[in-house]
Image (spheres, helix red, strand yellow):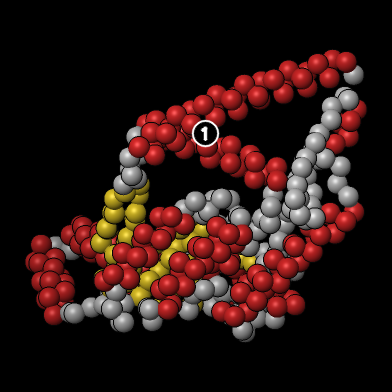
Amino acid sequence: MEFLFDYGLFLAKAATIVVAIALIVGIIAGAAMRQKPKKGEFQFTDLSEEYHQLQAELQKELLDKKAFKRWHKRQKKRDADALVPTTFVIDFHGSMAAGEVDALREEVTAVLAVAAPQDDVLVRLESGGGVVHGYGLGASQLDRIRQQGISLTVAVDKVAASGGYMMACIANRIIAAPFAIIGSIGVLAQMPNFHKLLKKNNIDFEQFTAGEFKRTVTLFGENTDKGRQKFQQELEQTHHLFKDHVFSHRDVLNMDEVATGEYWLGRQALELKLVDALQTSDDYLIEQIASRRVMQVKYQQKKKLAERMGAGAATGLEQLWQKLSSLHWYK
């Protein structure tokens, strides 16, 4: 037992050194980022043009020269005569902390600056969930598209669960791959408690608050039944708001059936009306290209090496803390 205790102390010291280094790097990079305003850049990719080029290259291999010239002439005439609407494509791959919402905000703003009523938006969404406030803001960003009268489709190729589904349900239409993970309309909070370990080693933990429920449960203090009950009550309230949010956008759902915290695969989700069709985003885009221009919109922030290192360290610390405290996770 003494060996295990010594080994545990060694790991704790090592972890402390790593965290300290990460904090220093994060502070330095943070100071550098505060000195200069963040700048980003947009990348616009004409997916329909890329598809047509691929199609032409393959046709050139399959057809003889005369046949290819005739085909190419027909394609050019069709493109010249057509005044087609645009489908804007936005990709959202969400992490636990939902930091990707910052880029989503910029992308939605750019699309709404030029979109016409006949245009539409496809969001290729992938997320297993995360913090309530982050994914709530993400859902609000997508709702801006709906409020402007622009049709919104969300495609789920892999997973849109919990906070991911909170965003997806905003759409006019949800499509999903047959084995995509959908649902998980529930709330999870978990954290370790080190009170017994501290007490065993004669270490006192003191915490000062003003307000009866300023802190309900804690990592290091002795949790009370009253604190646990209050924390559970807060989880139930958050779950109730989550269910109301989903039902306000998809009133065809039986909320008692789907808001249990479970997740389903695409085919099951279709039966439960969590999605509207089984289709991959690739198939959907090929359909759109036949009659529309398809333009991908992507916003990326420019970061120097020090900023990338600092941001990585800060993100790692943030995720570690969030995993320990787990305040109102969707997962």
Q: Quadrant of residue 289?
A: bottom left
Measured from the top left, where is residue 320 in percent x and y?
63, 39
Q: Residue at x 40, y 55 (%)?
A: 103
Where is 9 relative to 199, above or below?
Answer: above
Q: Amino acid at mark 1?
A: Ala
Instruction: Name above or below for residue 23 compared with residue 45.
Output: above
Which of the image's four quarters has the N terminus?
top right
Is residue 55 shown to the viewer in this render? no
Q: Is residue 280 left or right of residue 2?
A: left
Instruction: State the residue at coordinates (29%, 62%).
Output: 47
The reply, left or right, for residue 132 in relation to residue 93 is: right
Q: Position of residue 119 (x, y in %)?
A: 31, 77
Q: Residue furthest bottom?
A: 252
Q: Which residue is mark 1?
A: 313
**Which of the image's four quarters has the C terminus?**
bottom right
Residue 110 falls in image quadrant:
bottom left
Residue at point 90%, 54% (across, down) = 225
Q: Residue at x 84, y 19 (%)?
A: 5
Can you tell which quarter of the image residue 30 is in?
Answer: top left
In this orientation, which residue lies closer to the viewer: 268 or 118?
Answer: 118
Q: Nearer the viewer, residue 154 or 56?
A: 154
Q: Is residue 45 visible?
A: yes
For the image, the number of numbered tags is 1
Q: Position of residue 235 (x, y in %)?
A: 74, 62
**In the image: residue 179, left or right of residue 263:** left
| Residue lying farthest to the front in this orientation | 210
Q: Nearer the viewer, residue 11 or 81?
A: 11
At which x and y percent is residue 215?
76, 50
Give SS at disc 1: helix
Q: Is residue 235 above or below residue 304?
A: below
Circle 1 residues within 10 Å: few <14, some 14–19, many ≥20: many
